[in-house]
Image (cartoon, coloured by chain):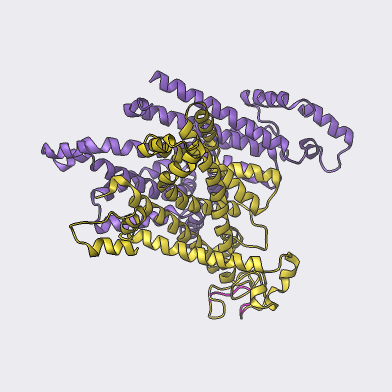
Chain colours: A yellow, B purple
Amino acid sequence: MTEEVVATAGEGAMEVKPLSPWADTWRRLKKNKLALIGLVIIVIFLLVGGVQEIANLLGPQNASETATAAQRPWWQRGYLAPYDPNGGDFHAGPAGPINPPSMKHLLGTDYLGRDVLSRALVATRISLLVGIIAVGIALAIGLSLGPISGYYGGAVDSVVMRMADIFFAFPYILFVLLIMTVLGPGFRNVFIAIGILSWAGYARLNRGSVLSVKQVEYIEAARAQGASDLRIIFRHVLPNTMAPIYVAIAMGIGGAILTESALSYLGIGMRPPDASWGSMITDYQTYFFAGQWWMLTFPSVALVVTVFGFISFGNGLRDATDPKLKE
Amino acid sequence: MLTYIVRRLFQLIVVIFGVTIITFVIMFLIPGDPAQLLAGKSPTPGKIALIRSELGLDKPLYVQYTRFVNRLAHGDFGTSYQTDRPVSAMLRENIPYTAQLALAAVLLELIGIPLGIYSALRQYTFWDSAYTTTALIVWGIPVFVMGLFLQWLFGLKLNLLPVTGAGDLAFGIFPNSWDSFLHLILPAIAIGLVEVAYISYMQRAAMLEVIRSDYIRTARAKGLSERQVVFKHAFKNAVIPVMTIAGIDLGALMGGAIITEAVFSRPGVGQMIYSSIGARDLPVVAAGVIFSTFVYVIANLIVDLSYAWVDPRIRLEE
């Protein structure tokens, strides 16, 4: 960052230091308002989800203890929210359990008198976890197979790419449903299934970049110095093919969050009483049509805004790193 | 072109082989004994053994797999645990409803093409940024959220359109009455609107890329009118890649619009699978996965081949 200031403001037109790729990307990205809004949304999402995950790690590990969570000191409750997300209260407000937004419950309460804001906040953790775990698994597989496939070519390449074809052809949600039919519900299984199914995109994307990078002189130089294939692939080739991957990660996290919410909506994934945004939407849809709009609206807004953040930032990043669009 | 077709057909066979093998492995190797499931609530060991030999579960795995594929090839998807009916008959009943919805949704999403082109031609204007922002927001709306809000607005508040079910069909997949046409509108919009956003965004990007290319600069330099440049020169190259997205969407949706069908309680392949999950009706879920994959792969093949036929750069690439 400081280098950039020096380079652009300090030296004038005579001798402009070339910007590092990161500084250059940032310079182009920050002109794109939508991408910046997306970035802000992502940061807020990471903070809220991260805080909930930390609270969850510090909290009681035994589910039966959480019934009295609200009586514990705040750092041992397993969540950081104004109310216990799973603690019902039939006298939450004057109307009984179901109350519209008020100063006491900013986003209202649901049919068991649970605070909607607290549930939506804690559910952020699920979306964060699915994003990180699913995309993490997909990247680990995709970024090992993709570069190897592109670098070696030939039979290795054919085998990996035909495998990618197979995984590409699976209807995502249906396949997770099949696995869940066999394994039974459980949200961790969903994360893993999403991850295993989505590696092919990363592998294909990276293989393409590796194909174009591996002909470049500095790779030949590394080979001439006697570097091993693995070292060349992971030290020299991979780092230079990452720009499209960062874009794919942003879009992939958005996609994983959408998939998880769809599965939760279908009733697979989260087990009650724990909430994810998708399971809240299923849970509250009848109340929505009965005029109690707040329960369903807020998790929907959280979901849409978060996914928008990732898509918008991802698109901005693509434009900022695309050499074809450089002026 | 011929080598290209052969290569793509070979890929298709590999994919279908892989999909059946993975589905087979998941169905039979992961915990839970299908014979025990089929034997009902209070199975006797004798009954389980009988079902085992009937299903061929006592044979070696490769024999079971060959039987499985052989039956699939004859259109036999097994019998539903839940309804005790052949799954293929259930599929046949549900396919027309899904096909109808898929076709309607894809026709709707083509609106994205003119929207995207219009936006690209007015890049950096207020209209362009307003539209692009809207498209990005809509793109991220899950189909079920869109569906629920459409039901609320057009069903509950405005009382204009039916929100659940589907009418009867005529001539295969067409609505047989005004009423069953009305039933199609909301589900088609729920899928279509999100896809319009996506398609128009892609179309805008494709158009921007084409319009900056050298041959367009040449066309402009020769003094062609802007209309001629856009419609005679840029249009085809910018639209074809986006049309392939619509083609692939059609294939994906034909395989079962599971979420939309669930939201609108519409009959269809997706609904059939959805209602089988609770009962762990494995043959139906597996048939659904295999059917959708087949439809998707074949749609992809058709799209790729027509793409290569229209655009020689594709088939000459490798």
Q: Is residue B13 above or below residue A109?
A: above
- Per the picture, the main secondary structure of the magenta-coloured stretch is loop
Tell which of A205 and A130 is nearer to you: A205
Question: Which x, y percent locates residue A82?
Answer: 59, 76
Tell which of B7 and A145 is nearer to you: A145
Question: Which x, y percent locates residue A45?
Answer: 50, 64
Tell which of B264 and A274 is nearer to you: A274
Q: Is residue B58 magenta?
A: no
Residue drawn at the location 18% of the way across and 41% of the way down? B227
Question: Which x, y percent locates residue A274?
Answer: 65, 63
Is residue B90 visible in this depiction of the protein?
no
The stretch of residues the image draws in magenta is A93-101
Quadrant containing the C terminus of chain B in the rendered view: top left
Q: Is residue A319 above or below residue A230?
A: below
Question: Which x, y percent locates residue A27?
Answer: 31, 59
Q: Residue furthest top?
A: B2
Residue drawn at the location 72% of the way across and 71% of the way down? A67
Is residue A76 visible in this depiction of the protein?
yes
